[in-house]
Image: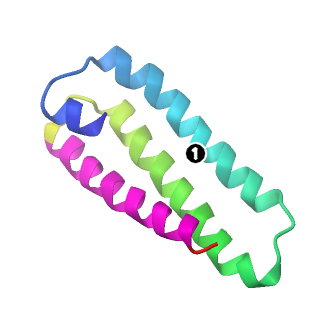
Amino acid sequence: MADDLARQRTTTTFVRVHGDELSAQAQHEAEKLNDDSIPRDLKARAQAAIKLASEIGGAIDELRTSPQDRGQDRRDGAKLRHWSAEAYRIANSI
C-alpha cells in the first residue's frame, strides 16, 4: 500500500479504509499477545512481536493521515518491508 501511494497507484480513500482495517488488526494482534499467558522462554520474542505490531500499526496510521506525502509514503514503505522481514524472523524462531 505504501509503495502504491508513493507511485500514485492507489487512492486516498482506499488507503484510509483498508489502512484502518490493517492498523486495527495489527493492534488487535498486539493486544492478544499482551493478554495471553506466555511461557517464560517465549516472553522476549512475544514482547518483540508486540512492539513490532505497534510499530506496523503506527506506520499504517501515518499513511492514512498523510497519503499525499510521497516522501513519507516511501519511508513508511521501507519501514514496513523491514518489519515484515522481522516478523517473519520472529515467527520462525518460535
Residue 57: x and y in percent read 50, 46
Please name the residue shown 55% across and 55% down the image. Answer: 53
Please name the residue shown 80% across and 83% down the image. Answer: 40
Secondary structure found at label 1:
helix
- Write down the residue under mark 1: 26
Q: Main secondary structure of the magenta part?
A: helix
Q: Could you classify mark 1 by the number of other residues whose Cα lies within 10 Å: few (under 14), some (14-19), or many (20 or more)?
A: many
The residue type indicated by label 1 comes to Ala
Residue 61: x and y in percent read 43, 39
Quadrant in which the N terminus appears: top left
In the image, residue 64 sits, relative to residue 49, either above or below, namely: above
Q: Is residue 88 magenta?
A: yes
Residue 80: x and y in percent read 35, 52
- 88 relative position to 46: left or right: left
Q: Quadrant of residue 26?
A: top right
Numbered-mark total: 1
- 21 relative position to 60: left or right: right
User: Range of the magenta residues?
Assistant: 71-92
Please name the residue shown 55% across and 68% down the image. Answer: 92
